[in-house]
Image: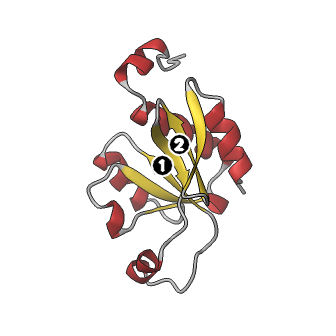
Amino acid sequence: MATWEDVRRLALALPETGERSSYGATTSWTVKGKAFVWERPLRRRDLADLGWAEQPGPVLGARVPDLGAKEALVAEDGVYFTTPHFDGHASVLVHLGRIAADELAELVGEAWYAAAPPMVRRRHPRDTG
Protein backbone atom coordinates (compact mmCIF):
# COMPACT_ATOMS: atom_id res chain seq x y z
CA MET A 1 0.00 0.00 0.00
CA ALA A 2 1.45 3.36 -1.06
CA THR A 3 1.62 6.21 1.44
CA TRP A 4 1.99 9.99 1.34
CA GLU A 5 5.59 9.49 2.39
CA ASP A 6 6.14 7.38 -0.74
CA VAL A 7 4.65 10.16 -2.87
CA ARG A 8 6.82 12.77 -1.11
CA ARG A 9 10.00 10.73 -1.58
CA LEU A 10 9.32 10.07 -5.26
CA ALA A 11 8.26 13.62 -6.07
CA LEU A 12 11.13 15.35 -4.29
CA ALA A 13 13.65 13.06 -5.96
CA LEU A 14 12.75 14.61 -9.31
CA PRO A 15 14.60 17.68 -10.64
CA GLU A 16 13.53 21.20 -9.75
CA THR A 17 10.62 20.15 -7.55
CA GLY A 18 9.15 21.64 -4.43
CA GLU A 19 6.47 20.91 -1.88
CA ARG A 20 3.81 23.33 -0.76
CA SER A 21 0.76 23.35 1.41
CA SER A 22 -2.54 24.38 -0.14
CA TYR A 23 -5.27 25.92 1.93
CA GLY A 24 -3.32 24.88 5.03
CA ALA A 25 -4.63 21.34 4.75
CA THR A 26 -3.32 19.56 1.68
CA THR A 27 0.08 19.14 0.09
CA SER A 28 1.08 19.43 -3.53
CA TRP A 29 4.38 18.75 -5.25
CA THR A 30 5.39 21.17 -7.96
CA VAL A 31 7.88 21.67 -10.75
CA LYS A 32 8.56 25.37 -11.36
CA GLY A 33 5.35 26.24 -9.51
CA LYS A 34 3.09 23.85 -11.43
CA ALA A 35 1.52 21.03 -9.44
CA PHE A 36 2.15 17.58 -10.83
CA VAL A 37 0.84 15.45 -7.93
CA TRP A 38 -1.29 16.54 -4.99
CA GLU A 39 -3.44 15.38 -2.11
CA ARG A 40 -7.06 15.49 -3.21
CA PRO A 41 -9.65 14.84 -0.53
CA LEU A 42 -13.02 14.31 -2.15
CA ARG A 43 -15.58 17.05 -1.65
CA ARG A 44 -19.24 16.44 -0.92
CA ARG A 45 -20.07 17.11 -4.56
CA ASP A 46 -17.42 14.59 -5.70
CA LEU A 47 -18.84 11.93 -3.41
CA ALA A 48 -22.38 12.62 -4.66
CA ASP A 49 -21.23 12.47 -8.30
CA LEU A 50 -19.50 9.14 -7.65
CA GLY A 51 -22.40 7.74 -5.61
CA TRP A 52 -20.12 7.17 -2.61
CA ALA A 53 -21.12 7.79 1.00
CA GLU A 54 -17.64 8.62 2.26
CA GLN A 55 -14.01 9.17 1.34
CA PRO A 56 -12.60 5.75 0.33
CA GLY A 57 -9.13 6.41 1.74
CA PRO A 58 -6.35 8.74 0.62
CA VAL A 59 -6.74 10.13 -2.90
CA LEU A 60 -3.86 11.42 -5.00
CA GLY A 61 -4.37 13.77 -7.92
CA ALA A 62 -1.86 13.45 -10.77
CA ARG A 63 -1.26 15.15 -14.08
CA VAL A 64 -1.20 12.94 -17.13
CA PRO A 65 0.15 13.73 -20.61
CA ASP A 66 -3.24 14.14 -22.29
CA LEU A 67 -6.91 13.19 -22.18
CA GLY A 68 -6.24 9.92 -24.05
CA ALA A 69 -3.86 8.82 -21.29
CA LYS A 70 -6.47 9.81 -18.72
CA GLU A 71 -9.16 7.74 -20.44
CA ALA A 72 -6.85 4.71 -20.64
CA LEU A 73 -5.99 4.89 -16.93
CA VAL A 74 -9.58 5.41 -15.81
CA ALA A 75 -10.64 2.42 -17.92
CA GLU A 76 -8.37 0.22 -15.78
CA ASP A 77 -10.25 -1.31 -12.89
CA GLY A 78 -9.91 -0.10 -9.34
CA VAL A 79 -6.95 2.28 -9.03
CA TYR A 80 -7.73 5.33 -11.18
CA PHE A 81 -10.90 7.40 -11.38
CA THR A 82 -12.13 10.91 -12.07
CA THR A 83 -14.98 13.22 -11.20
CA PRO A 84 -16.89 15.79 -13.27
CA HIS A 85 -14.74 18.48 -11.61
CA PHE A 86 -11.83 17.21 -13.73
CA ASP A 87 -13.73 16.92 -17.02
CA GLY A 88 -11.53 18.22 -19.83
CA HIS A 89 -8.44 18.33 -17.59
CA ALA A 90 -5.50 16.01 -18.17
CA SER A 91 -5.35 14.60 -14.66
CA VAL A 92 -6.57 11.54 -12.80
CA LEU A 93 -7.45 10.66 -9.25
CA VAL A 94 -5.78 7.65 -7.68
CA HIS A 95 -6.76 5.44 -4.76
CA LEU A 96 -3.39 5.73 -3.04
CA GLY A 97 -3.90 2.57 -1.02
CA ARG A 98 -4.48 0.48 -4.16
CA ILE A 99 -1.54 1.48 -6.35
CA ALA A 100 1.59 -0.68 -6.51
CA ALA A 101 4.92 0.94 -5.64
CA ASP A 102 6.38 0.58 -9.15
CA GLU A 103 3.22 1.95 -10.74
CA LEU A 104 3.24 4.91 -8.34
CA ALA A 105 6.86 5.67 -9.27
CA GLU A 106 5.97 5.62 -12.97
CA LEU A 107 2.88 7.78 -12.42
CA VAL A 108 4.80 10.41 -10.41
CA GLY A 109 7.56 10.54 -13.03
CA GLU A 110 5.07 10.87 -15.89
CA ALA A 111 3.14 13.54 -13.96
CA TRP A 112 6.36 15.52 -13.47
CA TYR A 113 7.12 15.30 -17.17
CA ALA A 114 3.56 16.36 -18.11
CA ALA A 115 3.73 19.44 -15.88
CA ALA A 116 7.34 20.53 -16.36
CA PRO A 117 7.90 23.53 -18.62
CA PRO A 118 9.74 22.75 -21.89
CA MET A 119 12.96 24.39 -20.69
CA VAL A 120 13.04 22.16 -17.63
CA ARG A 121 12.32 19.05 -19.71
CA ARG A 122 15.21 19.95 -22.02
CA ARG A 123 17.56 20.28 -19.04
CA HIS A 124 16.37 16.92 -17.67
CA PRO A 125 15.48 14.63 -20.59
CA ARG A 126 13.85 11.31 -19.88
CA ASP A 127 16.15 8.37 -19.35
CA THR A 128 15.45 6.22 -22.39
CA GLY A 129 17.82 3.44 -21.31
SS type, badge 1: strand
Q: Quick one: 118 or 1, which is closer to the camera? A: 118
For the residues marked 1 and 2, what is the alpha-carbon distance in whole angstroms?
A: 8 Å
The earlier-in-sequence mark between 1 and 2 is: 1
Query: Callout 1: few (<14), some (14-19), or many (20+) C-alpha neighbours within 10 Å?
Result: many
Q: Is residue 89 left or right of residue 7?
A: left
Report the quarter where the N terminus lies. Answer: bottom right
Q: Residue furthest front?
A: 24
Q: Nearer the viewer, mark 1 or mark 2?
A: 1
Residue at the image point whose x is 38% and y is 17% from the top:
119
Q: Residue furthest top?
A: 123
* Disc number for residue 107: 2
Q: Which of the 4 image quarters holds residue 98?
A: bottom right
Q: Is residue 40 left or right of residue 120?
A: right
Residue 73, position as x, y percentages in the image: 42, 53
Amino acid type of the residue tagged 2 in the rendering: Leu
Residue 9 position (above or below residue 51): above
Residue 45, position as x, y percentages in the image: 41, 78
Residue 40 position (above or below residue 100): below
Q: Quick one: 121 or 44, which is closer to the camera? A: 44
SS type, badge 2: helix
Q: Is residue 88 left or right of residue 64?
A: left
Residue 23, position as x, y percentages in the image: 54, 58
Residue at the image point whose x is 38% and y is 68% from the top:
83
Residue 110, position as x, y percentages in the image: 48, 36
**Residue denoted by label 1:** 62
Amino acid type of the residue tagged 1 in the rendering: Ala
The mark total stands at 2
Dot 1 and dot 2 residues touching (CB under 8 Å) = yes
Residue 94 position (above or below residue 37): below
